């Protein structure tokens, strides 16, 4: 656990003035820069993604349909098609050779070799699923035996990674193992954190805010199941008023007659088919028992469950309609929310693109190719496709109008139009 210390004397806040004045510098704490000795700062001793938390997040993802749909939707939205491109190639031959090298890397980067023909299209969903569930992706680059290129990327469970502060105050990554912590600050190791901050620099899971709400939601579903099972279908509640006692009738004779009348009525009700109607004396009353008598309760269940769904969707930054829950959302509002989600997905894609570029540049260097690469995700099929088409159409029409007005030449108009196609 971290504490707040004085930069000059390393004394926890709350100590008396006398203790601060008399204390000596404690080992392991950094001195402040000259002139800043009186400033307080945060010194964190150790960071860890908490193995139990990650196990909980994976369990929730794999066992609660709503949370599984959230991770699936985020992962598939983010894992859009993409491609490598060479940055400023010196020659066309260098560009072709670089693209050929990167295409080969994309075909074999998937870490699990038991799946045949699995390449980047299988690697990206796995990568984003781990990133959203665990809040991080980590692993080692495995080179070929002759060091002529990358063989594959070997992932490491983020739950076993921690960051510890050294004597110099700088944090280093360690991998927990049976033989003890292993220093993994190596050139062949890569760590990608999602939504890191000062308290959790190793990343934060997308599900970090929903375990409590999802627990309530599952309890609610369990209660709904019990209530529905108890109510079941409509049942008949038959109420029989005993007949009046006849004059001079003895007690045994009256009891026998009442029991016979009761048994005949029960037999009649049991023998009524779905298309039949019961016919009785007016001393027999038949009522319904079932969901029809508790519509207000059913509506209450629906609204409560809907509130739980909306809370979970809010915690995972998704809208209910993106997970198959329709509450009368208008088309314009749904489009706006979808565009908002895709903007968030693009921000995560940019972080993943840097990782893929690291892999690609390393592969190019091992192959002896003196160039660099860039990875670009193609979201045009799903993200703002209609709006992008309208914008391009309006720009082309503007170019045509400029040409007709004689403001630009035909060659200039052709050049501008080519840039939009």
Image (cartoon, helix red, strand yellow):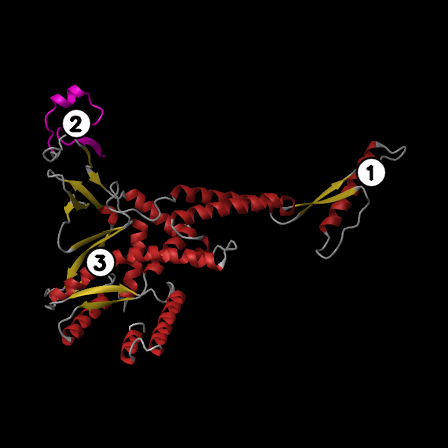
Circle 3 sits in a helix, a strand or a loop, which is it?
A: helix
Image spot of residue 15 (x, y percent): 20, 23
Q: Position of residue 11 (x, y in %)?
A: 17, 27
Q: Which residue reaches farthest bottom?
A: 410
Tell me where residue 71 appears, x and y as whole percent. Answer: 36, 54
Q: How far apart are the alpha carbons under marks 1 and 3? A: 88 Å
Judged from the image, the secondary structure of the residue bearing numbered disc 1 is loop
Q: Where 313 falls versus 370 (above or below)?
A: above
Residue bearing mark 2? 11
Give the mark, 1 or 3, whose residue is nearer the N terminus.
1
Mark 1, residue position: 243
- Say which label, 3 or 2, has the lower sequence index: 2
Q: Which residues are magenta?
A: 1-27
Residue that extends furthest to the top in the rendered view of this protein: 18
Q: Quadrant of residue 85?
A: bottom left
Q: How many marks?
A: 3
Q: Are marks 3 and 2 in contact (CB under 8 Å)?
A: no
Residue pictured at 29% horizontal, 80% vertical: 410
Confirm whether residue 313 shows in the render.
Answer: yes
Q: Residues within 10 Å of mark 3 (few under 14, many from 20)?
A: some
Q: Residues within 10 Å of mark 2 (few under 14, many from 20)?
A: many
Please tell me which residue is depicted at 15% across the width and 32% down the height of the picture: 7
Q: Residues at badges 1 and 3 in contact (C-beta under 8 Å)?
A: no
What residue does disc 3 label? Answer: 354
Nearer to us: label 1 or label 2? 2
């Amino acid at each position: 656990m971290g504490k707040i210390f004085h930069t000059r004397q390393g004394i926890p806040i709350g100590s008396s003035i006398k203790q601060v004045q008399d204390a000596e510098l404690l080992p392991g704490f950094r001195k402040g820069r000259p002139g800043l000795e009186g400033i307080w700062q945060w010194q964190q001793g150790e960071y860890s993604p908490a193995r139990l938390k990650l196990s909980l997040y994976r369990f929730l993802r794999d066992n609660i349909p709503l949370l599984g749909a959230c991770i699936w939707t985020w992962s598939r939205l983010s894992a859009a098609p993409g491609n490598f491109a060479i940055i400023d190639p010196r020659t066309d031959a260098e560009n072709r050779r670089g693209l050929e090298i990167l295409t080969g890397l994309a075909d074999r980067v998937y870490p699990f070799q038991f799946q045949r023909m699995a390449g980047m299209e299988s690697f990206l969903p796995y990568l984003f699923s781990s990133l959203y569930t665990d809040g991080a992706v980590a692993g080692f680059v495995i080179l070929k035996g002759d060091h002529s290129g990358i063989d594959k990327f070997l992932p490491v469970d983020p739950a076993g990674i921690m960051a510890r502060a050294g004597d110099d105050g700088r944090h280093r990554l360690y991998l927990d193992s049976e033989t003890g912590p292993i220093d993994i600050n190596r050139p062949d190791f890569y760590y990608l954190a999602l939504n890191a901050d000062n308290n959790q620099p190793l990343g934060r899971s997308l599900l970090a805010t929903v375990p409590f709400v999802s627990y309530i939601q599952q309890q609610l579903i369990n209660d709904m199941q019990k209530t529905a099972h108890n109510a079941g279908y409509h049942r008949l509640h038959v109420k029989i008023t005993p007949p009046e006692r006849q004059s001079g009738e003895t007690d045994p004779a009256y009891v026998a007659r009442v029991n016979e009348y009761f048994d005949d009525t029960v037999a009649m009700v049991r023998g009524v088919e779905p298309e039949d109607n019961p016919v009785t004396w007016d001393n027999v009353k038949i009522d319904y028992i079932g969901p029809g008598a508790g519509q207000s309760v059913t509506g209450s269940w629906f609204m409560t469950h809907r509130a739980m769904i909306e809370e979970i969707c809010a915690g995972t930054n998704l809208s209910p309609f993106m997970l198959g829950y329709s509450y009368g959302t208008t088309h314009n509002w749904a489009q706006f929310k979808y565009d908002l989600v895709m903007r968030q997905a693009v921000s995560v894609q940019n972080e993943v693109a840097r990782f893929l570029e690291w892999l690609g540049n390393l592969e190019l260097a091992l192959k002896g190719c003196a160039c660099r690469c860039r990875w670009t995700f193609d979201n045009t099929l799903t993200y703002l496709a209609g709006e992008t088409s309208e914008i391009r159409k309006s720009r082309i029409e503007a170019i045509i109008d400029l040409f007709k007005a004689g403001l630009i030449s035909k060659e200039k108009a052709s050049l501008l139009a080519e840039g939009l196609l």
